[in-house]
Image: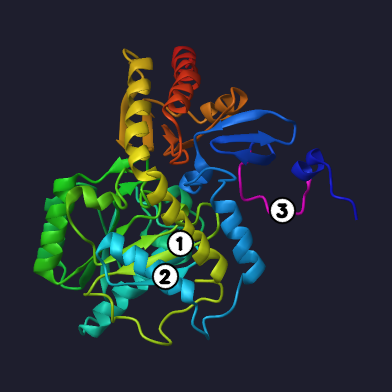
């Protein structure tokens, strides 16, 4: 059977209609650049939504994955997987935490974190444990992670949601302290260190320090979702390290495998013994290919100074955006850290997604009015300036006409 033509691929009715896709079929990439099946070239400001840490076709990563594929892609968690221990040891060394569980995605990592919190509560004799979660949060699309998410639009149509969540605003420590006074069933606080889908909303470092102190006082778990902001994206291995704290539970995914599906839950001493054999598991999680991708991603990042590059080039990009958008009344804020940047406008701006693609730039619009840039961490300073040179005129034109 002959492969379908690109146009036919885009019009096929057999894929469920769950994505609002652009009429673009990508064929290949090199570094921070992508090409579609029509030969058009794009600068990748999206990185597969913060996934492609090392860009595309990285010359060190590709042969390592080819080597692993030739050896073994999948075995089973019935048996030891030596690369799991290798990657777990690396993550524990970088985070200061104690142990890791491997799964396949950020959703699965967050789902596992919620299970840890509930089991932790039951082990303490709390029969209906509750977890503090946040407005504008996004933790995934399973029923449990959807319930923890703070976006009514993505929850609509999937009620009844899972109970056991108490929602508070971000960066309001008094709100959490009030819950502590009034709710004896709380067992954990669960938040993104920097909200991604919610609009690139950072937790203030002093707020995280206050949460750490409160969790210690209350005997709660501090669970920090680093799925999007972790693995060097902000210029440190994990975004919470800017605050000088450690969580008890840390879900990871996205950038850890540079495009190979992977997820992890890294835990500290308070959570390390909560789950035992039979409490949690996965068929594909921790498979040799994903583990090799994680090990090689961290190795290459360290060898090539990728994390420092994220900090340096992120500053270049923010400065270029600030300069290019100076004086634009419709630009509310440019925020983020490293190469995780949001440009909030004062109006919905979904149309910029299409216009940027037409101009040769990949990005996303989230929370209706926030342009999100999460490019590969190998982005050069020149490429950062090119992003700004493409994007700033698009934003100005959009604001002028709307």
Rendered image: mark on residue 295: 1
Mark 3 vs mark 2, CA separation in Å: 37 Å
The answer, for residue 172, to whether it is visible in the render is: no
Secondary structure beneath label 2: helix
Nearer the observer, disc 3 or disc 2? 2
For residue 386, above or below residue 297: above
Nearer the observer, 72 or 4: 72
Instruction: Give the magenta-colored segment's residue range.
Output: 12-21
Q: Is 15 included in the stretch rendered in magenta? A: yes
Mark 2, residue position: 86
Q: Residue at x 35, y 69 (%)?
A: 89
Dot 2: within a 10 Å radius of its alpha carbon, few (fewer than 14), some, or many (20 or more) residues?
A: some
Mark 3, residue position: 15
Outermost residue on the front side: it is 303
Secondary structure beneath label 3: loop
Mark 3 vs mark 1, CA separation in Å: 33 Å
Dot 3: within a 10 Å radius of its alpha carbon, few (fewer than 14), some, or many (20 or more) residues?
A: few
Callout 3 touching callout 1 (CB < 8 Å): no
**Residue 229 screen position, x and y as percent:** 36, 48
Nearer the observer, disc 3 or disc 1? 1
Q: Residue at x 84, y 47 (%)?
A: 4
Callout 1 touching callout 2 (CB < 8 Å): yes
Dot 1: within a 10 Å radius of its alpha carbon, few (fewer than 14), some, or many (20 or more) residues?
A: many
Nearer the observer, 246 or 118: 246
Residue 74, quarter of the rendered image:
bottom right
Callout 3 touching callout 2 (CB < 8 Å): no
- Tell me the quarter of the image containing the N terminus: bottom right
Q: Residue at x 47, y 76 (%)?
A: 82
Secondary structure beneath label 1: helix
């Amino acid at each position: 059977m002959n492969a379908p033509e690109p146009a036919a691929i885009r019009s096929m009715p057999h894929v469920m209609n769950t994505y609002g896709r652009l009429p673009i079929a990508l064929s290949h990439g090199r570094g921070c650049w992508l090409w579609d099946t029509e030969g058009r070239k794009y600068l990748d400001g999206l990185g597969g939504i913060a996934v492609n840490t090392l860009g595309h076709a990285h010359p060190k990563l590709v042969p390592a994955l080819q080597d692993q594929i030739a050896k073994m892609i999948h075995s089973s968690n019935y048996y030891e997987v030596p690369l799991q221990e290798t990657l777990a040891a690396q993550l524990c060394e970088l985070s200061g935490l104690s142990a890791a569980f491997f799964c396949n995605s950020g959703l699965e990592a967050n789902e596992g974190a919620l299970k840890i919190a509930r089991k932790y509560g039951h082990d303490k004799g709390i029969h209906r444990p509750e977890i503090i979660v946040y407005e504008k949060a996004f933790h995934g699309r399973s029923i449990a992670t959807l319930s923890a998410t703070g976006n009514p639009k993505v929850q609509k149509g999937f009620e009844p949601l899972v109970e056991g969540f108490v929602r508070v605003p971000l960066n309001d420590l008094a709100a959490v302290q009030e819950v502590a006074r009034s709710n004896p069933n709380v067992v954990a606080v669960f938040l993104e260190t920097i909200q991604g889908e919610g609009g690139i909303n950072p937790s203030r470092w002093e707020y995280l320090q206050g949460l750490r102190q409160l969790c210690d006082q209350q005997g709660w778990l501090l669970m920090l979702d680093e799925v999007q902001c972790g693995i060097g994206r902000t210029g440190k291995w994990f975004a919470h390290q800017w605050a000088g704290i450690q969580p008890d539970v840390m879900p990871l995914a996205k950038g850890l495998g540079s495009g190979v599906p992977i997820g992890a839950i890294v835990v500290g001493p308070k959570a390390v013994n909560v789950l035992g054999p039979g409490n949690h598991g996965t068929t594909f999680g921790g498979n040799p290919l994903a583990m090799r991708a994680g090990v090689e991603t961290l190795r290459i990042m360290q060898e090539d100074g990728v994390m420092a590059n994220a900090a340096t080039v992120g500053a270049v990009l923010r400065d270029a955006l600030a300069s290019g958008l100076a004086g634009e009344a419709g630009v509310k804020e440019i925020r983020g850290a490293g190469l995780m940047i949001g440009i909030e406008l004062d109006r919905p701006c979904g149309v910029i997604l299409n216009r940027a693609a037409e101009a040769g730039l990949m990005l996303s619009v989230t929370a209706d009015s926030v342009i999100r840039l999460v490019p590969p961490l190998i982005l050069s300073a020149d490429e950062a300036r090119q992003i700004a040179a493409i994007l700033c005129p698009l934003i100005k034109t959009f604001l002028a006409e709307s």
